[in-house]
C-alpha cells in the first residue's frame, strides 16, 4: 500500500536483510541480531548482548527503480560520562556497489555507561527518519549498511517504487569471527570496517561475527559458525582472551581445538583461516586483564592499559606472543589432516612498522586509516590468487 506522500511501505523481513542471523520483533519494528536466540540465551553477559545486537555488516539489500528511499529507525546511543561524546552512527547507502550517500540519526534511545563503576542507565528515545532522495533512475542494487556500533531497530522502509530481494544465486559467502577490531571499532562507517572493505575487494558476501569484547572461544559462537551458511570462514582469535584474562595456556589450546572441531562439524572441507592477533604493543609481553586508563579519562581521553604481571606468564598467563605461537602450532598440527585449514599471523596485517606509522589511538583499536590498511593487506594475502581464499572468491 502507499502512504499519504505516495511512498510504498515494504515490510522489513529476513529476505531484505543480509548479515543478520536472527530478527527479533519489537514494539517499534524489528531488531537484527548477529547471534541466534539460542546462543543469546546461553550467555547473559551485557557486553555480549550489546555487541551482537550492534549490526556490524548488516544491511538492507534489494533491487529497485526507486529514486526516493526512507527508513525509520531507532538507534541506541552510548554515553560514557567523562569521555568525549561518541559520534552518531552512520548509515551507508551503496548503489551497485558504490557509496552513494551517508546519513545519521541524532536522537534515539540512550545507554549511559559509567566506566569507573560499570553501572548503566537506559532512557527511551524517538524513532527517526532517514531520507535518501534524487537517486539515479533505472533499476539498481541498493544496500543500506546499518551503523556497525549502534544497536538499531528498524521500524519502516518506504520507497517511491517497489523493491525486491536480491537473488542468492552465485553468492560466495565469507563468514568471519573476531573481536572489536573485526566488529569495526573506530572505523569511519559500516561499509569501511576492515572486513567490509576486504569483502568488497574479494567480491564476496560478508557475514560479520566480529563481537566487540566477546571473541572468547565460546561454544555457542562456534555452533553459530557451524550452522551458518558459508563458502569461506575465518576466525581471528586471541586479543579478547588476553583482554579478559579469561584462561591460562592449559585451557587455551584445548578450547581452540574444540572451537575448530565444532566449526568443522558443519563445514568439514570449507576453507578455514585462523588469524592470530595484530600487533598490540601493550599486550605483546604483558598479560591481561586490560583496564581503562583513568588518568587519561580524567583528561577527557579514552585509553586502555595492560594491568597484568609479565612474571605470571611462567604460570600460564597469556600474552599475545604466547597466543600467536600456540595458534601457529595448533594449525600446523591440524593441517596435517585438514588441507583446507590455514593460518595467518596477524602481524602481517598490522606489525611493528605499521604501528610506527599508524599507532593505535587508544592503545587497542585501529582508527579509520588503519582499518583500510588492514583490509588491503587481508585482501592481498587472503583473497589474492595465491591466498587461501583466492580460488574460492568471486573475484
Image (cartoon, rainbow, N blue to C red):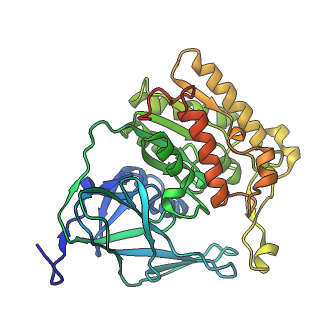
Q: Which residue is rendered at x = 70% and y = 81% of the image?
A: 82
| The N terminus - image quarter | bottom left
Q: Position of residue 318 (x, y in %)?
A: 75, 42
Identify which residue, 115 or 83, lies in the foreground: 83
- Asked whether the viewer can see residue 376, the reply is yes
**Count of residue discs:** 0
- Asked whether the viewer can see residue 282, the reply is no
Q: Quadrant of residue 321?
A: top right
Identify which residue, 110 or 256, lies in the foreground: 110
Q: Position of residue 341 (x, y in %)?
A: 54, 25
Identify which residue, 279 or 112, lies in the foreground: 279
Q: Which residue is rendered at x = 30% and y = 36% of the image?
A: 170
For residue 84, side relative to residue 102 (left or right)? right
Up the image or down, 21 lies above or below 255; here it is below
Q: Residue furthest right?
A: 311
Q: Position of residue 140 (x, y in %)?
A: 28, 56
Q: Residue furthest left?
A: 1
Q: Position of residue 182 (x, y in %)?
A: 57, 51
| The C terminus - image quarter | top left
Q: Which residue is rendered at x = 74% and y = 55% of the image?
A: 289
Amino acid at each position: 500500500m502507499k502512504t499519504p506522500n505516495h511512498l510504498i511501505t515494504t515490510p522489513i523481513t529476513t529476505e531484505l536483510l543480509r548479515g543478520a542471523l536472527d530478527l527479533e520483533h519489537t514494539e517499534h519494528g524489528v531488531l537484527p541480531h548477529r547471534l541466534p536466540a539460542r546462543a543469546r540465551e546461553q550467555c547473559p553477559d551485557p557486553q555480549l548482548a550489546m555487541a551482537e545486537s550492534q549490526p556490524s555488516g548488516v544491511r538492507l539489500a534489494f533491487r529497485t527503480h526507486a529514486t526516493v528511499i526512507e527508513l525509520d529507525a531507532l538507534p541506541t546511543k552510548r554515553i560514557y560520562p567523562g569521555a568525549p561524546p561518541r559520534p552518531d552512527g552512520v548509515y551507508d547507502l551503496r548503489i551497485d556497489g558504490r557509496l552513494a550517500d551517508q546519513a545519521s540519526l541524532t536522537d534515539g534511545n540512550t545507554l549511559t555507561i559509567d566506566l569507573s563503576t560499570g553501572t548503566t542507565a537506559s532512557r527511551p528515545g524517538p524513532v527517526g527518519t532517514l531520507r535518501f532522495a534524487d537517486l539515479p533512475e533505472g533499476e539498481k542494487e541498493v544496500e543500506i549498511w546499518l551503523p556497525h556500533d549502534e544497536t538499531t531497530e528498524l521500524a519502516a522502509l518506504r520507497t517511491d517504487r517497489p523493491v525486491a530481494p536480491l537473488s542468492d544465486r552465485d553468492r560466495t559467502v565469507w563468514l568471519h569471527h573476531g573481536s572489536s577490531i573485526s566488529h569495526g571499532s573506530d572505523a569511519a562507517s559500516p561499509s569501511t570496517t576492515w572486513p567490509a572493505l576486504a569483502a568488497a575487494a574479494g567480491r564476496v558476501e560478508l557475514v560479520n561475527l566480529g563481537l566487540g569484547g566477546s571473541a572468547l572461544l565460546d561454544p555457542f559462537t562456534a555452533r553459530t559458525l557451524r550452522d551458518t551458511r558459508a563458502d569461506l570462514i575465518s576466525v581471528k582469535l586471541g586479543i579478547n582472551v588476553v583482554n579478559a584474562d579469561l584462561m591460562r595456556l592449559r585451557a587455551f589450546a584445548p578450547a581452540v581445538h574444540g572451537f575448530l572441531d565444532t566449526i568443522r562439524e558443519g563445514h568439514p572441507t570449507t576453507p578455514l583461516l585462523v588469524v592470530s592477533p595484530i600487533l598490540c604493543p601493550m599486550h605483546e609481553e604483558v598479560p591481561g586483564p586490560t583496564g581503562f586508563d583513568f588518568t587519561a579519562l580524567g583528561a577527557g581521553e579514552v585509553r586502555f592499559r595492560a594491568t597484568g604481571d609479565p612474571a605470571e606468564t611462567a604460570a600460564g598467563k597469556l600474552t599475545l606472543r604466547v597466543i600467536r605461537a600456540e595458534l601457529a602450532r595448533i594449525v600446523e598440527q591440524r593441517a596435517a589432516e585438514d588441507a583446507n585449514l590455514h593460518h595467518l599471523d596477524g602481524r602481517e596485517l598490522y606489525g611493528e612498522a605499521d604501528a610506527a606509522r599508524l599507532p593505535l589511538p587508544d592503545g587497542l583499536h585501529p582508527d579509520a586509516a588503519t582499518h583500510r590498511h588492514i583490509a588491503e593487506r587481508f585482501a592481498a594475502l587472503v583473497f589474492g590468487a595465491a591466498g587461501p581464499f583466492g580460488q574460492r572468491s568471486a573475484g
